[in-house]
Amino acid sequence: MPTFDPCRTARKLAYNNALANHRLHEACSKLMPGEFEASRVSFFPSIKATLNHILTVDWFYVDALEGGTLGPAAWDVEEPFDDITALAAEQAKVDRRLVALCEAATPEKLASTTEIHRSGRIQHERMEDVLNHLFQHQTHHRGQVHAMLAGTSVPPPQLDEFIVADDGRFRSADIAALGWSEDYLMR
């Protein structure tokens, strides 16, 4: 009987994260002028603000997971990108960093302590807990963008066809765009 592998789970969630971000950014790149920054009802007031928030929080946590000390400087500029093309490129960079971090994870590393530099203090958390928090944060806010897209000229994309093998037929174009393969995802 196969045993649970937390490292494989972390990898799969990192792949899912990158694939969902790719698909969501592709949809947002098709928005009509003015729709990306238009005021909307959600936790953040626009698609632009929400996607920038996802990115800056990713900078914060991925840096901490890598052992960095960026801390709150990650969000010195609340919305660092005004257009989806530049934002998507930066999100893809941090997604690649997160994938690499999860691919290198070992059970010992997942159980190790991550130092998160907060304003005036250092928060100590298990790496696996920080990863779970980060993946939940991403999913939460991508869902908000998904809902906001329903009020635009672009239909919201499917965002949950990435973890199981049977969904391969739905993600082939996305994984090709990321330079991945089904074998890569399913290992």
Image (cartoon, rainbow, N blue to C red):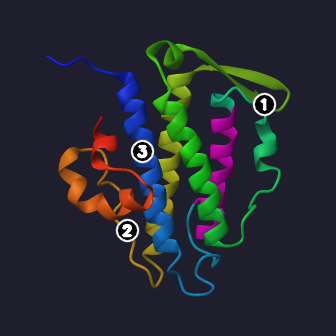
In terms of sequence position, does the residue under pointer 2 or pointer 3 come before the other?
3
User: In the depicted view, which residue is nearer to us: 74 or 186?
Assistant: 186
Q: Amino acid at mark 1?
A: Thr
Q: Amino acid at mark 2?
A: Pro
Magenta-highlighted residues: 43-63
User: In the depicted view, which residue is nearer to us: 38 or 93?
Assistant: 93
Tell me residue 125's x, y (percent).
61, 20
In the rendered image, which residue does mark 3 sit on? 15
- The label number, if any, that marks residue 157 in the structure image: 2
- Compute the Cα span from label 2 to label 1: 35 Å
- Compute the Cα span from label 2 to label 3: 17 Å
Q: SS class of the residue under badge 3?
A: helix
* Residue 44 placement: quadrant: bottom right
Tell me residue 57's x, y (percent).
65, 46
In the rendered image, which residue does mark 1 sit on? 69
Tell me residue 174's x, y (percent).
38, 61
Tell me residue 121's x, y (percent).
81, 23
